[in-house]
Image: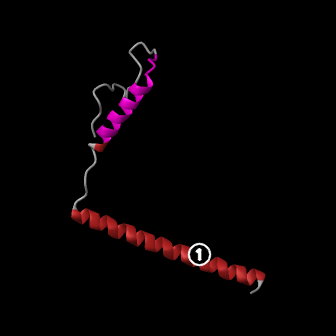
Amino acid sequence: MSESASTTSGKPERAGRDGAGATKKRGLFARIALFVRQVIAELKKVVKPTRNELFTFFVVVIVFVLAIMAYVGLVDLGFGRLALWVFGG
């Protein structure tokens, strides 16, 4: 990970502040343009997964979803039987 050249204390410099500490108010369109530039910069960092990574991620998600489904199903079955026992059925 790389730090930007404008950081000295390890914290990123806040946009809209000059060296004297006074705040500079940005206009609406300037803030929108800054947002769009930051979004584009973040999108350039995105890395596409390889075919093998994609398959691995798919399998992990499917196994996790099946495990959660089984857990919720068993808890539901347990609460259902408990309700029948408490209220009679």
Quarter of the rendering containing residue 73: bottom right
The amino acid type, in three-letter code, at marker 1 is Val
Identity of the residue drawn at 50% across and 76% down = 70
Q: Is residue 45 above or below residue 54?
A: above
Q: Position of residue 75 (x, y in %)?
A: 59, 75
Q: Along the horizontal axis of the image, is 46 left or right of 70? A: left
Q: Is residue 51 above or below residue 6?
A: below
Give the crowd class for mark 1: few <14, some 14-19, many >=20 residues within 10 Å.
few
Identity of the residue drawn at 33% across and 25% down = 8
Comparing 9 with 42, the one in front is: 42
Give the extent of the magenta segment: 23-42
- Decide if residue 19 is in sight here: yes
Identity of the residue drawn at 28% across and 48% down = 46
View extreme (right): residue: 87
Q: Position of residue 42 (x, y in %)?
A: 31, 41
View extreme (bottom): residue: 89
Q: Is residue 28 above or below residue 77?
A: above
Residue carrying label 1: 75
